[in-house]
Image: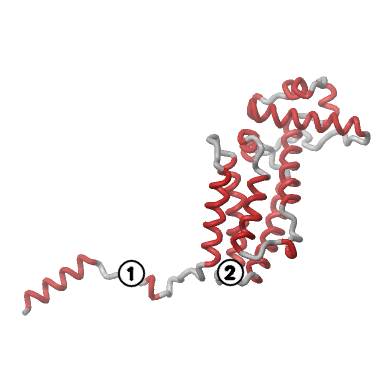
Amino acid sequence: MTSDRRGLAPRKQPRQVRAELTRQRILDAAARVFAEYGYAAGTTNRIAERARVSIGSLYQYYPNKDALLVELLTRHLDAGRAATPLDQDGRLPASLEDVMRFYVRRAIDNHREDPQLLRVMMEQGPRTPAILERVAQSELERTAYARRLLRDHPDVRVADTDTAARLVVSTIELVVHKMMAASEQTDTTRLENELVAMLTRYLTNGPAPTSEDPDLVPAPDSGSDSGSDSDQGSHT
């Protein structure tokens, strides 16, 4: 969904504790209403009723439901960055498998919200330039950190750590989101174990063969071989 010309930024920045609590109550109510009713039926009237505030009070903080959804998406992105800070070098486990588990588990934890709310935020939420820039910047930072981590880790066997870093970052984010936002319940323990195993095996199995690798030369066609044998037999 693309944003229209209506304002998507919060109207009122709370300066008092009471106002901040009201804003948080409205946001929490919006999250529950979007999760329960979806985006189309998640009206500001329902959100105000769930937050136990008047519709006028809601509009003092947010001009429309798109602004609420943008705020929820921003909160989700910020929580993800806070859960996986890029200064973990001295605190990461030694084994590559445990490093992958560290990041996969935190990605799963950040997606434990209601699956319906995740789908609404990611598939129907307005994509403002600020959010797109934040997503792109976060991906660049995480990829750069992953590149350095893979380059320096003794267990990594892939030759192209640049591509490997992009694959690891994208795979964790996209797979975890897809599985956690699915309508059917996801076994998070199995998801974590399988994703960690997949990434660890990819990173430790050595460089991938190229098109020049002799092991990739196509095997002779079995039909042709049998035909040659027949011909040879007929000449003897």
SS at mark 2 in the image: loop
The answer to whether 49 appears left or right of 158 in the picture is right
Vertical order, 119 against 98 (above or below):
above
The C terminus lies in quadrant = bottom left
Q: Residue at x 7, y 78 (%)?
A: 235
Vertical order, 83 against 120 (above or below):
below
The answer to whether 215 appears left or right of 197 in the picture is left
Q: In this view of the protein, which residue sits in the foreground, 140 or 175?
A: 175
For residue 125, what is the image quadrant?
top right
Q: Residue at x 75, y 35 (%)?
A: 5
The N terminus lies in quadrant = top right
Q: Which mark is residue 49?
A: none
- Where does label 1 land, which residue? 218
How many residues crowd around disc 1 within 10 Å: few (fewer than 14), some, or many (20 or more)?
Answer: few
Residue 152, position in %: x, y? 66, 71
Q: Earlier in the sequence, mark 2 or mark 1?
A: 2
Q: CA distance from mark 2 to mark 1?
A: 29 Å
- Where does label 2 land, which residue? 156
Circle 1: residue type? Pro
Residue 11 in view, yes or no: yes
How many residues crowd around disc 2 within 10 Å: few (fewer than 14), some, or many (20 or more)?
Answer: many
Q: Residue at x 67, y 66 (%)?
A: 149
Q: Are marks 2 and 1 in contact (CB under 8 Å)?
A: no
Which residue reaches farthest bottom? 236
The answer to whether 70 appears left or right of 204 in the picture is right
Residue 60, position in %: x, y? 85, 28
Residue 160, position in %: x, y? 57, 69
For residue 53, what is the image quadrant?
top right
